[in-house]
Image: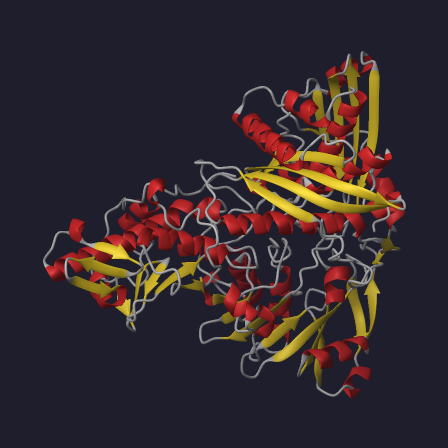
């Protein structure tokens, strides 16, 4: 991704434009203190009692952004970690834009990567004016003022931040406030730092989106088409009138469904079940899964786009003809639901100037203009108060703001005066959500004298980005980059590699799913590298290292994590069944070794050894947790999950038939973080891509079965 704004020049540029940096700036461009709380910049607030509040521009869905971003400010400010508080930022792209996206949003494992210097400089700027205020008050040089856990000191003088904040709010920091040398860090890189969101969640104090209730609200649930692309013809709600708590039912103006209004969620669910509706399926997805798979596989014959730089199908074909060993492997990847623990929901209420959302808002910078267009408002008339969300895995980051638009339509259809709480249940999420797209892949690999001489790789998958706001950034020459990421840009030295892509067409709505295209592309690449190693009679780890020997920075870092994971796992130990995979995604490098046992023909996943190079480790505990979470989430999908269709209607509905990872499935996980001085990179998603292929390669090592159709249970694999 291209950074829209330089991180290091953020304060400099903001100082030049005044309001772009400072909240509540007065006419002279100085900080303004209101209600006793000073906003020293968009990210740092200090209360009269000295408590530092860090404003978190990336919302928290369990991935640890509240802790990570707060660490950066606290480090530079020398704040007291135990009393420091965090506040989720409101919707405001002018102040809180993701520097990689150009608008306010959380995703792509970018939170720490794009905010690292921005939040450090915010903390350093706040420190600078607090020190200056104290020095001025005490008549000492700024160099004589020190800070320890939120206490300013100089000789016999001492004061907490709150005692100096009013004066500090009248001062302007330098354009480039000095940040600490890494040797001075006391919080960044510290193991065991207590998470900022844990206590509130543990004691039930944290407000999640589902918890929000505003005066006078009604609950709305949507009766949607049972097939993707269907439109409403008519409906009959007469039987719903008998449900206690039912208020009304109205067709949404875009024909997407019926909004059912009730006094509470249970009444809305019961009433919705009583409504009879007629749908027009002429433009809907009416195929069953087998037909959809055959369609995708048929697209592999003649790729629309040739996407790998330097790749040429004609030249690759000649190289394959000269090979003495040929591999040809087809893959089928199913649609997958995100299935976060908290299904989608939000509240919309009228304001004097427009509307206000209470939402676990992953992309408020998109929600505001999209909803504004629906309600004929200006984006600034759509307020967004961000609250915590119980997971997302990409589902809340819809570029089309689908559930917020539903809420807006339900709100305006009811008259636009009554607050509406939109609620999805689990069945709505599994049957009618936005899925990871189905994909088919085919690879032909030629080897001669044990070495790869040609690689023809073809992909058929529906584009996630075409038609959305990110198309202009991430679609190049017709190619959706996320469809081919991890293959098109593979860092293996593979001679004669050509990669083709064809966009599949279907009304089934698709969206990025944790690690996006890497989730299936790493699986195919790493199981293919394993198959090539076996065909060459080579050790799978050494075979990969041999193809990463070019000395590029990416190859050096991939080799580093691969060697570390293999060493820590005891690769090659006699009697142990192991598989390995290594992959770069979101600018992080992760290698994993899976160890399994076979018990009465069933597979038991015993251990995953993970090595990660994500640059400077801001919060090692969170990095380990994200690796563990990504591995677990990926394994659950690889082992058993799939969304299937019968004549266009989804077969699965809830966790009994769309199984999450079981506690008995979860292996021991050992995470090793590579020490690095490089800039921090993503950790929310990169742990997932290598997990599936590492397991698949271990299964092959133990049983000789190469799993190419997912989930693994569809290939006859049983798990203990």
Check the image and tell me how it is coloured.
secondary structure
- Depth check, front residue: 180 or 386: 180
Q: Is residue 218 left or right of residue 185?
A: right
Q: Position of residue 709 (x, y in %)?
A: 83, 41
> In the image, what residue occupies the spot 27% across and 54% down?
127
Where residue 83 sits, quadrant-wise, is: bottom left
Residue 714 position within the rendered picture, expressed as x and y whole percent measured from the top left = 87, 46
Above or below, 246 against 692 in this view is below
- Could you tell me if residue 160 is visible in this image? yes
Q: Is residue 334 visible?
A: no
Rendering quarter of residue 263: bottom right
Q: Is residue 16 above or below residue 162?
A: above
- What residue is at 57 percent from the left and 45 percent from the top? 470
Q: Is 667 left or right of 72, judged from the image as shown?
A: right
- As drawn, which residue projects farthest toward the front? 574
In the image, 547 versus 414, the foreground residue is: 547
User: How many circles with numbers are drawn on the protein?
Assistant: 0
| Residue at x 69%, y 35% (from the top left corner) | 581
User: Residue 276 location in percent, x, y?
Assistant: 83, 75
Closer to the camera, 21 or 463? 21
Q: Residue furthest left?
A: 139
Q: Position of residue 206 (x, y in %)?
A: 53, 70
Q: 352 or 145: which is nearer to us?
A: 145
Occupied quadrant, residue 135? bottom left
């Amino acid at each position: 991704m291209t950074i829209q704004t330089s991180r290091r020049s953020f304060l400099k540029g903001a100082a030049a434009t005044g309001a772009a940096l400072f909240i509540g700036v007065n006419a002279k461009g100085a900080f303004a203190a209101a209600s006793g709380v000073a906003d020293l910049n968009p990210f740092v607030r200090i209360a009269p009692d000295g408590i530092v509040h860090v404003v978190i521009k990336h919302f928290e869905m369990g991935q640890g952004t509240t802790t990570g971003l707060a660490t950066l400010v606290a480090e530079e400010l020398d704040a007291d970690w135990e009393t420091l508080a965090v506040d989720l930022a409101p919707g405001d792209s002018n102040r809180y834009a993701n520097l990689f996206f150009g608008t306010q949003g959380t995703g792509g494992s970018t939170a720490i990567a794009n905010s690292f210097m921005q939040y450090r400089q915010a903390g350093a700027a706040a420190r600078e004016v607090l020190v200056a205020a104290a020095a001025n008050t005490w008549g000492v040089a700024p160099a004589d003022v020190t800070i320890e856990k939120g206490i300013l000191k100089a000789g016999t003088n001492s004061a907490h931040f709150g005692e100096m904040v009013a004066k500090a709010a009248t001062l302007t920091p330098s354009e480039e406030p000095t940040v600490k040398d890494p040797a001075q860090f006391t919080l960044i890189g510290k193991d065991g730092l207590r998470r900022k969101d844990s206590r509130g969640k543990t004691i039930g104090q944290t407000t999640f989106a589902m918890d929000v209730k505003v005066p006078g609200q009604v609950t709305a649930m949507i009766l949607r088409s049972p097939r993707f692309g269907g439109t409403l013809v008519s409906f009959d709600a007469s039987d719903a009138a008998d449900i206690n708590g039912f208020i009304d039912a109205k067709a949404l103006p875009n024909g997407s469904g019926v909004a059912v209004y009730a006094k509470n969620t249970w009444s809305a669910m019961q009433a919705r079940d009583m409504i009879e509706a007629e749908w027009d399926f002429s433009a809907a997805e009416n195929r069953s899964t087998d037909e959809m798979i055959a369609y995708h596989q048929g697209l592999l014959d003649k790729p629309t786009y040739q996407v790998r730089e330097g790749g040429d199908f004609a030249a690759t074909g000649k190289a394959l003809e000269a090979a003495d060993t040929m591999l040809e492997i087809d893959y089928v990847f199913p649609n997958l639901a995100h299935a976060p623990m908290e299904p989608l929901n939000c509240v919309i209420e009228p304001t004097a100037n427009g509307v206000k959302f209470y939402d676990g808002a992953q992309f408020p910078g998109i929600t505001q203009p999209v909803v504004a267009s629906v309600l004929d408002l200006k984006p600034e008339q759509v307020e967004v108060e961000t609250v915590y969300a119980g997971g997302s895995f990409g589902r809340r980051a819809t570029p089309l703001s689908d559930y917020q638009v539903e809420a807006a339509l339900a709100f305006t259809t009811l008259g636009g005066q009554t607050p509406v709480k939109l609620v999805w249940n689990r069945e709505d999420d599994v049957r009618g959500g936005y899925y990871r797209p189905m994909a088919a892949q085919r690879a032909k690999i030629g080897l001669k004298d044990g070495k790869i001489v040609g690689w023809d790789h073809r992909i058929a998958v529906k584009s996630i980005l075409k038609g959305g706001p990110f198309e202009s950034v991430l679609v190049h020459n017709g190619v959706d980059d996320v469809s081919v990421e991890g293959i098109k840009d593979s860092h293996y030295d593979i001679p004669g590699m050509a990669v083709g892509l064809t966009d599949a067409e279907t009304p089934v709505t698709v969206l990025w799913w944790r690690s996006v295209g890497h989730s299936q592309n790493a699986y195919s690449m790493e199981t293919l590298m394993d198959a090539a190693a076996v065909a060459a009679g080579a050790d799978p780890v050494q075979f990969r290292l041999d193809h990463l020997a070019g000395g590029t920075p990416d190859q050096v870092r991939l080799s580093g994590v691969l060697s570390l994971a293999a060493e820590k796992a005891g690769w090659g130990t006699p009697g142990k069944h192991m598989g390995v995979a290594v992959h770069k995604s979101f600018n992080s490098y992760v290698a994993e070794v899976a160890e399994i046992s076979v018990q009465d023909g069933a597979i038991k996943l015993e251990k995953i050894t993970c090595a990660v190079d994500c640059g400077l480790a801001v919060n090692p505990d969170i990095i380990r947790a994200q690796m563990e979470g990504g591995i677990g989430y990926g394994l659950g999908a690889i082992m058993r999950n799939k969304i299937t269709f019968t004549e266009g209607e989804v077969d699965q509905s809830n966790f009994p038939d769309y199984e999450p990872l079981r506690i008995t499935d979860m292996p021991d996980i050992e995470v090793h973080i590579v020490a690095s001085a490089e800039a921090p990179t993503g950790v929310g998603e990169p742990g997932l891509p290598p997990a599936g292929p590492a397991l698949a390669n271990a299964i092959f090592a133990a049983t000789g079965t190469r799993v190419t159709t997912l989930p693994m249970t569809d290939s006859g694999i049983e798990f203990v």
